[in-house]
Amino acid sequence: MSGFVRGNFAFMGKVALLAIVTAILALLTEHAFVQKEYAIGSFLLFAILALNFTYLTKFSIPLKFFVPGILFFIAFVIAPIIFTLSMSTYHYQTGNILGKVEATEQVVTLGAEPDANGTTFDINVGETPSGDFAILVSDIANNKFFISTKDARTEVPASSVTLDENGVATAAPGFTLISAETLSKSDDYSRIHYKYQDKFYIGIEGQNVGAVFQQSLTYDKAAGVIKNVVTGDTYKDNGRGNWAKVGAPDEMLTPGWRAPIWFENYTKLVSDEKVRTPLIKVFIWTVVFAGMSVLTTFALGLLLAMALNRKIRGRRIYRSILILPYAMPSVMSILIWAGMFDTEFGAINNLLHTHIAWFTDANFARGAVLLVNLWLGFPYFYLICSGSLQAIPTELQEAAAIDGANPRQIFRKITLPLLLQILSPLLIASFAFNFNNFNLIYLLTGGGPRETLDGQIAGATDILISYTYQIAFGNNTQDFGLASAISVLIFVLVASISLYGLKKSKVMETFG
């Protein structure tokens, strides 16, 4: 009986929890489809079906453990990779952020010019009996009044309007004034083009001021072109996300939209000298930085591990002190080091009695980056080297010593080869981590020094990931498409290096 109760309660709890999760996901799915985020909505719908099928049936017991992980893997690993790959094939940068429909609407909206006389009117905002926004316009100079909506203009006799002390109409038949408090809750009324005459309309410049504009740009949906009714110019889709002037393709209307350009971002990495030259320099420094970081941290960690592998007085205290840099949050450590390297007030210059501009000279900045990374990284290698040294059979070293090998030969011929065989996967992982060590570069040097006045994007200490960040977010022209292409390149490089290293270390064969 107790087992029956326990089973029923467990089942009811599972159903209740599944119902709550399903309800939350269903709500998110609805919002995603309403916002026209069809990819997100489809994934959430798939998650609902997968979870309910897995936990309400006995199709597969192992699947009950794997489904949450699989869903998170798709959402936070596979989906970003697919999105990055997709965006790398688009002309997607500042000025080309929107979709084509939204961009065209903004181009047409912005394609308006004040009339030649700069005509303005006093207005009051209200609504018609049908509930449409309307403005009551007062042409005080000519003692004329009219009500204007988006589609119509209705003249109002001067005798039928109510005027304030300034002679501005505040009430008229067929017009209901909207209070300023109500208008402050929404600006929908200010986006409307109110009818004036012919090709002119009244746009709201302030809550009580309207100006006359001429709509110079119109969109011909049937022909798929934008026309300037004033100059007669025609603008066509140039296939790169902009309306370009026919006969003068360099003259384009803004804003543009995201448009597929396929592999142009990738070819630009090779063919465009402005992109290729800094990219090569950054790539070389990235490899040097990652390689030197692994080499120095491993060497220092191994040296300390071997020193403390012997029985010495206070060994536990020394070990505790050595892991302190690893125990502290890296962000805090990097910021502290950044302050220590300050030219005017930094502790390092004060201790050395120097005046070195650490972050304005390329060589000193690179040295500072490697030094700080050594401080952050050596405790990790100290810990794993200490464990690995314990795993090496002492019989091998004793046998070598009996055969006449000195300590240096024992280390070079026995200890180091065995350590490298054990630690190869970790060394490769450390190289890959430092290849993308964004936090250190961003917080310590910001990728600099760089000549920003010369339009230089890549700094002396920028690695590929921080250079990509500068292209995407740190420049006046944010080129997300090019940044995505470089991100794909980084992924391919790190994956290739990791696979090669794992193959050479035969780790995969061990697990196979």
Image: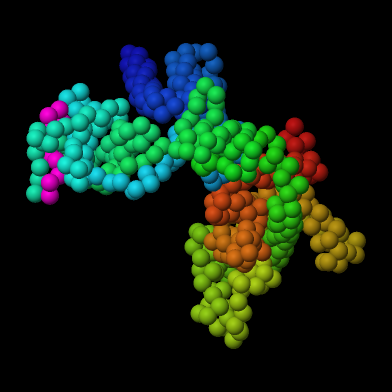
In the rendered view, does 264 fall on the left or right side of 500?
left
Task: Write the start and end of the magenta stretch as one range.
Answer: 166-176
Residue at point 91%, 61% (across, down): 403
Q: Residue 304 appears in which quarter of the rendering?
A: bottom right
Residue 504 in percent (x, y) is at 81, 43
Observer-nearest residue: 3 or 197? 197
Q: Quadrant of the C terminus?
A: top right
Let me know if residue 174 is in the magenta part.
yes
In the rendered view, does 185 fall on the left or right side of 352?
left
Residue at point 79%, 40% (across, down): 503
Residue at point 51%, 59% (across, down): 331
Q: Is residue 403 visible?
A: yes
Q: Quadrant of the N terminus?
A: top left
Residue 305 in percent (x, y) is at 68, 63
Residue at point 20%, 34% (across, down): 146
In the rendered view, does 7 fall on the left or right side of 98?
left
How many numbered dots are placed on residues in this image?
0
- Looking at the image, the residue that sits furthest to the bottom is 353
Observer-nearest residue: 221 or 346? 221
In the rendered view, does 417 fall on the left or right side of 327?
right
- Looking at the image, the residue that sits furthest to the front is 142
- Looking at the image, the residue that sits furthest to the right is 403
- Please tell me whether the stretch drawn in magenta is mainly helix, strand or loop: loop
Q: Residue 27 appears in which quarter of the rendering?
A: top left
Q: Is residue 368 visible?
A: no
Residue 445, placed above or below residue 45: below
Residue 448 in percent (x, y) is at 61, 64
Let me know if residue 236 is in the magenta part.
no
Describe the colour scheme in one phrase.
rainbow
